[in-house]
Image (spheres, helix red, strand yellow):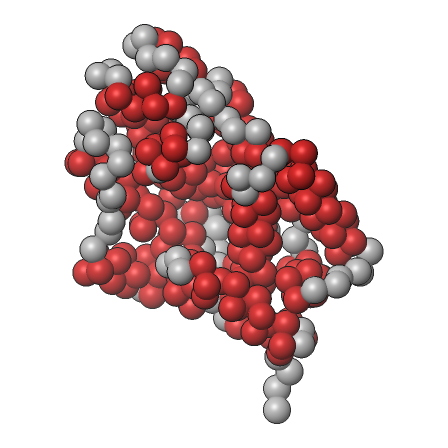
Amino acid sequence: MSAPPLNAAQADLDAVEGVVRAAGTSFYRGMAVLPPARRHAMYAVYAFCRMVDDIADDPAPLETRQPRLEEWRGRIAGLYRGEASDPVTRVLRQAVREFGLRQVDFEAVIDGMEMDAVAIVAPGLAELDLYCDRVAAAVGRLSVRAFGDASPAADEVAFHLGRALQLTNILRDLAEDAARGRLYLPRELLEAVGIPAEPEAALRHPALAEVCDGLAEMAHGHFRDARTAMSRCDRRAMKPARLMAGMYGAILARLRRRGWNQPGLPVKVPKWQKMWIALRYGLG
């Protein structure tokens, strides 16, 4: 009988996979293109991100959430001393050893969640870029190593694709974020067209489309630059990145076709298009 992936305990692998399955996202299926060890490393990275994101989104008072994020900072530091105390950290410890995942990238994700915990409202462009780097590009830097490419070009993919995905998320989730008191649209773009830096008021403003179109153009540029960087990477390792770029690119295109007058109107990619994207970018 062969050893379990990452030489981790099967019970730990099953527990981490259960976290990913329970999230109900397309991530679980998307990682199927990876070999078992790399796939389970990505499940563990996802589980970590999910757990710290849940802390940031918890409606509990900030003073109770910050210690929980600090606890995770300690658990990540422990990985690099060989310490682990639960299924997620035990699988992460093996992934760190196997694929060279960097402590600074895990810490950057926690830094991003701390930004979210205090409810971001109309950040400046520089702050928005820093936020995108922490909550998305840092995850990308972890991911490309788990995928199998730690080259400078792979980090460039993480830089651009992370920003493209996060900006698309921001445009997709405008209404949901406003209900939580958050507004990620950049202050400079809002001020240029006279939109107040207040979540609900901004979404009702007649000039909202101009700001959203500007942010969508930024996302489109990052998708383009990410694909250019992918061409300099290991093609097999970039399969999941191509798949994510294809899926999120389709979401962005549908958002732009829908328009910005009803930001709460859901946008979904139909199953036939998901299948086509999977065949073109993931399985081909």
Residue drawn 73% across the image and 47% down it: 71
Q: Residue furthest right?
A: 81
Residue drawn 41% across the image and 48% down it: 231
- On the image, the x and y values in percent for residue 213 come to 27, 25
The quadrant the N terminus occupies is bottom right
Q: Choose between 90 and 2: the one closer to the eye.
A: 90
- Answer with left or right where residue 215 lies relative to residue 5: left
The quadrant the C terminus occupies is bottom left
- Placement of 125 over or under 25, stated as above or below: above
- On the image, the x and y values in percent for residue 92 come to 66, 60
- On the image, the x and y values in percent for residue 7 come to 67, 75
Residue drawn 51% across the image and 68% down it: 18
- Answer with left or right where residue 161 lies relative to residue 100: left
- On the image, the x and y values in percent for residue 126 come to 52, 20
Q: Quadrant of residue 264?
A: top left
In this figure, what is the number of numbered marks? 0
Q: Can residue 244 be spotted in the picture?
A: yes
Q: Choose between 36 and 228: the one closer to the eye.
A: 36
Q: Can residue 153 be spotted in the picture?
A: no
- Placement of 79 over or under 181, stated as above or below: below
- Placement of 31 over or under 210, stated as above or below: below
Q: Residue furthest front?
A: 60
